[in-house]
Amino acid sequence: MRLGEATARELFASARVARLATVTPEGEPHLVPIVFVAVGSRIVTAVDAKPKSTLSLQRLANIAAYPRVCVLADRYDEDWTQLWWVRADGRAHVVESDPALLQPLVDRYSQYAEQSPPGPLIVIDVDRWTGWSSAG
């Protein structure tokens, strides 16, 4: 059953992880899992300290080339009456540092209180929320 915008936002915000879809400068799809915080019509995620070969991530180059992105959060359960997904479509930009944007992430994920993300933030201004739920 199709979700209304308010319900879609609420379910999305409740998810602990989502997937960020970008497009490479060559036009190829690129999908990565992210942790995030949803604040109003914005989604904020960060390049964090989890092991990486570089902080110059492909997703950052992709956003610089094509700022249109999609973020998908969902819930799977063996009880299929509990299934849902929400997609947020919008425009992303990279912010090198902004304590006001970082703090909600720190508040949501205790790992960030222990070790603040060293890389930039990705801020997504969502212009469309769509979703589906088996429960309606």
Image (spheres, helix red, strand yellow):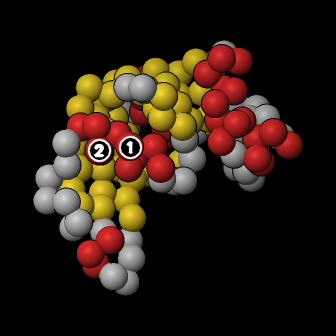
Q: Position of residue 18 (x, y in %)?
A: 46, 51
Q: Which residue is drawn at 66% across and 26% down?
A: 102
Q: Residue furthest left?
A: 1
Viewer-nearest residue: 52 or 41: 41
Kind of residue indicated by mark 1: Glu
Asked whether disc 1 touches disc 2, contact meaning CB atoms under 8 Å apart, the reply is yes
76 horizontally vs 14: left or right: left
Q: Residue furthest right?
A: 114
Q: How crowded is mark 2: few (under 14 residues within 10 Å), some or many (20 or more)?
A: some
Instruction: Please identify the quarter of the rendering in which residue 36 is found.
Output: top right
Kind of residue indicated by mark 2: Thr
Q: In this view, does 79 lie above or below 26?
A: below
* Gap between marks 1 and 2 measured at Cα: 5 Å
Q: Which residue lies furthest to the bottom in this view?
A: 78
Q: Which residue is drawn at 53% across and 31% down?
A: 44
The residue singled out by tag 2 in the image is 7
Helix, strand or loop status at disc 2: helix
Instruction: Please identify the quarter of the rendering in which residue 1 is found.
Output: bottom left
Helix, strand or loop status at disc 1: helix
Q: How crowded is mark 1: few (under 14 residues within 10 Å), some or many (20 or more)?
A: few
Q: In this view, does 1 lie above or below 125?
A: below
Circle on res. 89: none
How many tags in the picture?
Answer: 2
Q: Position of residue 9 (x, y in %)?
A: 35, 40
Viewer-nearest residue: 46 or 30: 46
The residue singled out by tag 1 in the image is 10
